[in-house]
Image (cartoon, helix red, strand yellow):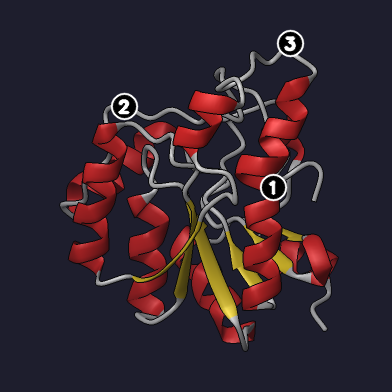
Amino acid sequence: MIDIEKANAELEGATPQAIIEWALGQANKPIVTTNFGPHEAVILHMATQVNPNIPVIWIDSGYNVRDTYKVAEEIIEKLNLNLEVYTPKVSAARRDAALGGIPSVDDEAHAEFTEQFKLEPFRRAMADQAPDIWLTAVRSEQTEFRKDMSVVETGPNGVVKVAPVLHWKEADMMTYLEENGLPTPDHYFDPTKAQFGRECGLHTKL
């Protein structure tokens, strides 16, 4: 059983690489999640340097733009990722054709849309994988909510959620990408967030 408060005290000031090494040293069934958005190759590269076979979980809404899908394939091949893809039970094509497409954030239907396209597939992934350690690439400068997050927290189903790059800035991420020859998409769109700085619920509701 990991003592969350003690872990955060011990890891204060540690590098992301050191945090990942610590986390994977504690783990029996670790995972790392990704949306293949900007800078996501950083944590995927760091994690696979320590454990090349770590399961990589991608909740693919079906609404990613072409650039994101192209970069995702490049990263998957370059890092030889052990990828598990989870998709909504309702396809993006069906949602667009018959169910009204993507609701605006002010529409009461947006909560149901987020449940269908992000939260339900994520819960399904967590139930299937049953991890004890979850590595996530969230960073404190991304949203107001994330400013108050800790590197080590308790996540859904008792999983220990670890955010190795929580205190890195965008410049740090870009430097790491450049130094390691890693790609990042120029265009990315998350339909469940719809606007910059908004949470989709993955880190606030689960």
Residue located beneath label 1 in the image = 119
**Image position, residue 15 (x, y; %):** 49, 59
Q: Amino acid at mark 3?
A: Asp
Of the residues under marks 3 and 1, which one precedes in the sequence?
A: 3
Q: Residue furthest front?
A: 98
Q: Amino acid at mark 1?
A: Leu
For the residue pair 135 and 125, the one nearer the viewer reads as 125
Front: mark 1 or 2: 1
**Image position, residue 163 (x, y; %):** 60, 55
Residue 131: which numbered mark, if any?
A: none
Disc 3/disc 2 C-alpha distance (Å): 24 Å
**Image position, residue 198 (x, y; %):** 65, 24
**120 on left or right of 76:** right
The residue sitting at 60% across, 51% down in the picture is: 89
**143 on left or right of 80:** right
The residue sitting at 62% across, 84% down in the picture is: 27
Q: Amino acid at mark 2?
A: His
Disc 1/disc 2 C-alpha distance (Å): 23 Å
Tell me the element at label 1: helix
For the residue pair 73 and 10, the one nearer the viewer reads as 73
Tell me the element at label 3: loop
Residue located beneath label 2 in the image = 187
**143 on left or right of 174:** right
Quarter of the rendering occupied by the N terminus: bottom right
Q: Residue furthest bottom?
A: 28
Question: Which image quadrant is residue 185 in?
Answer: top left
Check whether the beta carbons of the residues at disc 3 and disc 1 lie within 8 A of each other.
Answer: no
Residue 106: which numbered mark, if any?
A: 3
Of the residues under marks 1 and 2, which one precedes in the sequence?
A: 1
Using the rendered image of the protein, determine whether residue 15 is visible from the camera's viewpoint.
no
Q: Is residue 110 above or below residue 69?
A: above
